[in-house]
Amino acid sequence: QVQLVESGGGLVQVGGSLRLSCAASGSIRSINTMGWYRQGPGKQRELVAAITVGGSPNYADSVKGRFTISRDNAKNTVYLQMNSLKPEDTAVYYCHADGVVYWSGSSYHSGRDYWGQGTQVTVSS
């Protein structure tokens, strides 16, 4: 099976920085897209940033210029560098992996996506 484990959340003051990491484990052959979503209090889950296996990033307008997504394909790990944090960035951040191909022990499987358990980011003013 495939698991996503996030780390790096916490409490930071306005204008501060945090770096989130998410490592995918399991007998993974490849992951097409890895990304980060967030869900703030009373809000729907929204895409923050995503990056393809080829390194093409996509950002929500609200984080462009402040957040940078990157990935290490050899480690099946995705990172989110968050700078100039604002109170409205407060949310639970979820790692997401799409287009995962993994080895089950007898064959390769693909077709579903995976989510991490979430990590809290709180920006205090």
Image (cartoon, rainbow, N blue to C red):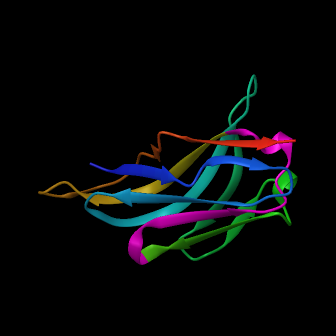
Quarter residue 52 falls in: bottom right
Residue found at the very far top of the displayed protein: 42
Q: Residue at x 60, y 49 (%)?
A: 9
Q: Which residues are magenta?
A: 74-91
Quarter residue 120 falls in: top right
Tell how many labels.
Answer: 0
* Spot occupied by residue 105 in the image (x, y as percentages of width and height): 13, 57
Q: Is residue 102 magenta?
A: no
Q: Residue at x 19, y 54 (%)?
A: 104
* Spot occupied by residue 47 in the image (x, y as percentages of width and height): 70, 47
Q: Name above or below for residue 82 compared with residue 113.
A: below
Q: Nearer the viewer, residue 60 or 82?
A: 82
* Spot occupied by residue 26 in the image (x, y as percentages of width and height): 28, 57
Q: Is residue 80 magenta?
A: yes
Q: Name above or below for residue 42 compared with residue 77.
A: above
Q: Quadrant of the C terminus?
A: top right
Residue found at the very far left of the displayed protein: 106
Q: Nearer the viewer, residue 118 or 100?
A: 118
Q: Is residue 15 left or right of residue 52?
A: right
Q: Residue at x 72, y 51 (%)?
A: 48
Q: Nearer the viewer, residue 101 or 41?
A: 41
Q: Residue at x 82, y 56 (%)?
A: 63
* Spot occupied by residue 100 in the image (x, y as percentages of width and height): 40, 57
